Amino acid sequence: LERARSIAVALHGHGMKKGDHVALILPEAGDFIPTFLGILQGGGVPVPLYPPMGVGQLGGYLEHCQHIVGASRAKWLVTNRQIHAVIGKVHESAPDLRQILGMSDLAGDPALWRDPGLTLDDPAFIQFTSGSTSRPKGVVVTHGNLAENAHAVMRVGLDSNDEDRGVSWLPLFHDMGLIGFVIAPIFHRVPVTFMSPMTFLKRPATWLEVLSKHRGTITYGPNFSYAITAKRVRDRDLEGLDLSHVRVAGCGAEPIQAEVLRAFADRFARVGFREKAFVPSYGMAEDTLAIAFSTGIPTDRVDADRLWSEGVAVAVEEGGVEIVGCGRAFPEHGIRIVDVESREVLPDRRVGEIEVSGPSVMRGYFEQDEITAQTISPDGWLRTGDLGYLVGGGVFICGRAKDVIIVNGKNYYPQDLEWAGSEVPGVRAGNVIAFPTFREGLGREA
């Protein structure tokens, strides 16, 4: 808190006022977290950006960086010396940007800090979407959104207690790492140990070692992280490890494969990991972070042909496709399925677009009122763009509406084709991409 207030005082010295936007590109948690909190302590609005990942991607990265800094109307950008050298031309397309600051520019006297007078209705930060299906858009998250979603995550979803300890390698510029392991734990006073995403990617065994050393009880990762950890961790890496205290191993941010989670549980059962620790999760930035949680590996096995051709999830005993359930809506929040064309609410086991409501729904996209109006209905329902169905209130995710491949009237979800392709001998899991093409004269997608 003292360091955050020191940073807030320094930012005020550079001219920051309540409501001003400050972009930050800081790869290290030790710099990112106090700077993010310092901007908040000063009444500013942080705009996190991801750092450059490699020399070969600098051209595209600079364009992405310029877009977000410009679109967010950030007046300051905080980064380190190395990244500053890469993004020096960011001013060219960011007319509001006044100055690029380093950590050495952010040392103020915390005794001079004054309460900026924020309310729950004030914007807390702007989370730019990944831009996987469109140009990144700035999601305005309020302090009220964070308070509600932090409570839903920590108290309702995870039932956190005084004995919990978090362990995270997730990037802090992404909502799952930032809200899930910085903001929500601060609300409920859960200590967290951070490690670098690059450390995890280079050696996944480090994740398990840190969990064991710090007796971590809560951790999270996308589906791929459980897959590569089960595959790349060697038997000798398991010596001395104890994962028996892990009670929450969350999985979200991308389609969840039951087979991947089972393989992870089987691989690490010998060091105390329990399958019931899994928490399959559904969420998105536009709903602050979390929408629904389940526990264990609850699945629904359905007829694949009818799912694709009719949009109906018919349960079968054998064969078909297995879809992981992500649980029910939190209290005071809602989940419903609507027809993509008519927008009529659909009954259980009918596939349609998922809509959500409640106090976690964003205020809107920054300076994009028209897109906001298309995304949030007048009565507060948020169109997620995801396809899925309900069974007794529990939500099952099929895929992104924009990604669906339609061939001869059948809807194919890319991840189903990708998972099937990964089963081919000699094909590496996670290295298959399915997408539609349109061939002249064929009159349909292929």
Image (spheres, helix red, strand yellow):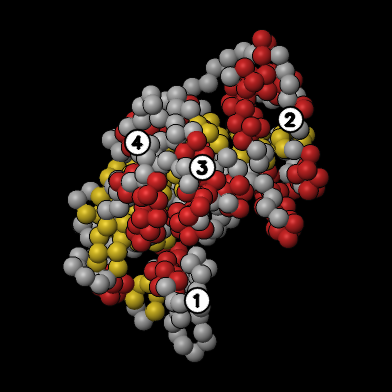
Disc number lying in front (3 or 1): 3
- Mark closest to the chain's N terminus, 3 or 1: 3
Task: Determine whether label 2 and label 1 are within 8 Å by CB.
Answer: no
Q: Nearer the viewer, residue 107 or 163?
A: 163
Q: Say which amino acid is labelled 1.
A: Gly
Q: Which residue is mark 4?
A: 158
Task: Determine whether label 2 and label 3 are within 8 Å by CB.
Answer: no
Q: Say which amino acid is labelled 4.
A: Leu
Residue 47 percent across, percent down from the top left: 61, 38
Residue 428 appears left or right of 147: right
Q: Say which quarter of the image contains residue 113.
A: top right
Residue 86 appears left or right of 240: right
Residue 426, numbered circle: 1
Q: Which residue is mark 3?
A: 209
Q: Say which quarter of the image contains residue 4.
A: top right
- Mark closest to the chain's N terminus, 2 or 1: 2
- Mark closest to the chain's N terminus, 4 or 2: 2
Q: Say which amino acid is labelled 3.
A: Glu
Query: Helix or strand or loop: what does disc 1 sit on?
Result: loop
Q: Which residue is mark 2?
A: 103
- Mark closest to the chain's N terminus, 2 or 3: 2
Disc number lying in front (2 or 1): 1
Query: Helix or strand or loop: what does disc 2 sit on?
Result: helix
- Circle 2: is it few (<14), some (14-19), or many (20+) Cα within 10 Å? some
Q: Say which amino acid is labelled 2.
A: Met
